[in-house]
Image (cartoon, helix red, strand yellow):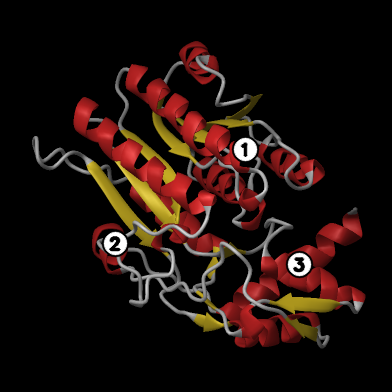
Amino acid sequence: MTVLVTGAAGFIGYHVSAALLARGERVIGVDNLNPYYSVALKRARLKQLQAHKRFAFHRVELARPGRLEALVKRARGVDRVVHLAAQAGVRYSLDHPRAYVESNLVAQLEVMETCRALNGLKHFVYASSSSVYGRNAKLPFAEDDRVETPQSLYAATKRADELMAYCYAHLYRMPTTGLRFFTVYGPWGRPDMAYWLFAEAIERGKPIKLFNEGRMRRDFTYIDDVVEGVLAALDRPPADGGPDAPPHQLYNLGNNRAEDLDRFVSALERALGKTAKRQYLPMQKGDVPATYADVTAARRDLSFAPRTAIDEGLRRFVDWYRDYHKRR
């Protein structure tokens, strides 16, 4: 059958689509190619995917009512949906709140309505974020922790997505799984993420900005490990346990390590063979001092086992980053 992947031109969407194609699936990818970051990078990802005969791409504004549903009806055969499209970025949400309501709330509603109209839907998997945990003091973060104190509108929209998905699982018995991603990095990544910004600055001999005076810890998770978790979740839809146990599940997908930011920068310096100029700055609005994933549930249910150490993951990213810019 066929998997619909939204956000297929994005970082995680590209890698998930490629992995699905590699195991013989037919993939319909949709994306609106918005200019939040380089559209050329998004098109370069799509070019890789479009080399496969079993991949079809459609440019779609998901938030426009009925657009995705009409496409899926024409395509036929879609039985699983991986919804990765979203307006990303914590800091961008401070000044562009409407983009998050449209792309993260309205669009998710339209995707779920499309799923509800599908005959034979096996599973709806959607992206959430570690941002939902806010400034929780308890580490590592577990799926049953309180998540009522988002520190940004981005985090609030992701938590709202989880609640809407639970509601659809309850009302329509739609098998649904949310995946809380923790600082995903790697080849074909996003230029607005710290590791890319740091690499670019270090290569050019410019200072890198370390917020909260550098006292930050992040659960950096390599893209290949995340993709394995996404596919494992997709293959294991939650069971319907009756009125009080709808078929909805949440999982953390992280590396199960909280790396000090200085350690991360040191590993990037080694991968680049260059020394960073560090600029220490106060904490930014909407940010949090630490993220750290408890992956007990994903390990138990999905056999999720992240294997890529930060040094190896950053080496692979730097190799790709330099090759990509050389070819451009």
Three-letter code for the amino acid on which mark 2 is drawn: Arg
Q: Identify which residue, 104 or 311, lies in the foreground.
A: 104
Give the residue pinned by disc 1: 99
Per the model, the C-alpha gap separating discs 1 and 2 is: 26 Å
- Residue 10 got which mark? none
Query: Quadrant location of residue 10?
Result: top right
Q: Are marks 1 and 2 in contact (CB under 8 Å)?
A: no
Give the residue pinned by disc 3: 197
Q: Is residue 158 above or below residue 198?
A: above
Image coordinates for residue 175, horizontal then vertical, percent: 26, 36
Three-letter code for the amino acid on which mark 3 is drawn: Leu
Image coordinates for residue 92, horizontal then vertical, percent: 66, 51
Tag in front: 3 or 2: 2
Per the model, the C-alpha gap separating discs 3 and 2 is: 32 Å
Q: Earlier in the sequence, mark 3 or mark 1?
A: 1
SS label for mark 1: helix
Q: Is residue 319 above or below residue 55?
A: below
Image coordinates for residue 177, horizontal then vertical, percent: 33, 45
Give the residue pinned by disc 2: 146
